[in-house]
Image: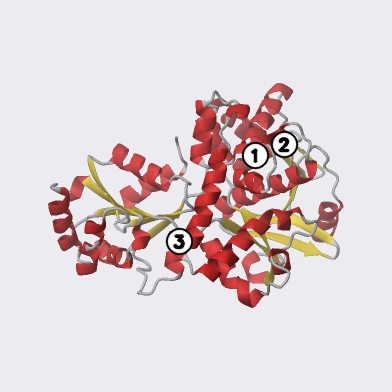
Amino acid sequence: MYRKIEKELLKWKQNSKMPLMLIGARQTGKTYILEKFAKENFKNYVYINLEKEQNISEIFDETIDPNELIQKIEILKNINFDVENTLLFLDEIQVNENAITSLKYFCENEKNYKVVCAGSLLGVKINRFHSSFPVGKVTIQYLYPMNFEEFLIANNEEKLIEEIKTHYKNNTPMITPIHNHALDLYKNYLIIGGMPAIINDYLNNEKNITKVNFELSEQIITSYLADMNKYTENTESIKNSKIYNAIPKELARENNTFKYSIVDKDARKIRYESSLDWLLASNMILKCNLTEKPESPLKAYINEDKFKIYLSDCGLLRTLSNIDYEEIILNKNEMYKGVLTENYIAITFKEKFKEIYYYTFGKYEIDFLIKLNGDIIPVEVKSGRRNRSKSLNEYIKKYNPKYSIRISSKNFGMENNIKSIPLYAVFCINED
């Protein structure tokens, strides 16, 4: 399946001598996309799983000199390593800290070694690195679950993508049948989420949502919880699990600013903050910061104590919340459909903007603030067609933004300086 990050990988191949590190949550497709990239862009590649190939992992405990490492790998793999035409792929690199340290020396080596690496919980490993992390010697890229545009590409809906982009640019409504078709696909994505294994199962079952094996989602969540047990102390693992499992309850609250007391009635920041940081570094959850001024740079005005937490994938959130897909298809659970919708927007904006923010003033709240072409733009999210919002109207009166965005199931349009963007077109925002 095509991933948009492939463009970034090609840029890296053409322009960078630094090793590339791909960071992302488990099951987002890191190994798949790097192997696909290797097969399509190099004559040869050497794949090494440092968790499974203990004999090679031990080499890094003896030396971190690239030339010596390659020589030993050649012997153990019984290969000839052609530097100019071979990619070295170190998977599960987090299990060996010396392997991460060696990336600095691969970067500085006179030979033009091409090295990529990935691993589960690599973000956590970097945050807790005991040695000196090779800052400035590694290109870091993030792989998120498949976004809605990638989901459309997987469904062979390239013509629909172009139609969406055209109407987004022109602010003109699409004809109703195509608009409804796009909404149906979005609704399926909201249910399935962006995990490649589940999307692949959907495609293999004739794109019939009723035939999807949703146990795959449960298995991914189980693997996440297993990672917490494997890579943390028992007490920290319990706290990590409590936070992760409390997210559906947090998001369902009318004021869903994160509160430790929702996780555990006796919870306090001092006890749970490290667990929250672990989950953020693992890319299992996302943080949306409260900014106290709708001015650039938004990051300069964040309130460290007020934020929202979202799950990294809307399909996993639906599963963790025990919401049946029929409830979404038949609009039986409008309240939680709104929760899933907000989470979907948060994921999309995180991938696009790296940092995400919301804003409150008085009794009003703006779902998201984003920076587009130098302007701070308020964004309101609605899961359905109803689009009346006092908060957005009051914000416009108070701050007079260049324009505003309302995301809902309504068609494209521009009215009262509010740009209407259908839920299926959020990927168009901030497109290069």
Identify which amino acid the numbered label 3 is placed on.
Lys
Look at discs 3 and 2 and give the one toward the viewer: 3
Give the residue number, with chain letter if any, for mark 2: 328
Rendered image: mark on residue 230 = 3
Amino acid at the residue labelled 1:
Leu
- What residue sits 23% from the left and 63% below the top? 58
Separation (CA) of disc 2 from disc 1? 8 Å
Residue drawn where x is 49% and y is 39% of the image: 196
Please name which of the two marks, 1 or 3, marks the residue nearer to the observer: 3
Residue 423 x %, y %? 69, 39
Mark 2 vs 1: CB contact within 8 A: yes
- Pick whichever, 35 or 84, lies toward us: 35
Q: Is 362 or 34 nearer to us in this picture?
A: 34
SS category of the residue bearing label 3: helix
First in sequence: mark 3 vs mark 2: 3
| Mark 2 or mark 1, earlier in chain | 1
Q: Quadrant of the N terminus?
A: top left
Give residue 190's mark: 1
- Are the residues flagged by discs 1 and 3 in contact, CB closer than 8 Å? no
Q: Is residue 73 left or right of residue 347?
A: left
Q: Quick one: label 3, few (<14), some, or many (20+) residues within 10 Å?
A: few
Taking the view exactly as shown, the residue that stands out farthest to the bottom is 270
In this picture, is 304 found above or below 378? below
Q: Residues within 10 Å of mark 1 (few under 14, many from 20)?
A: many
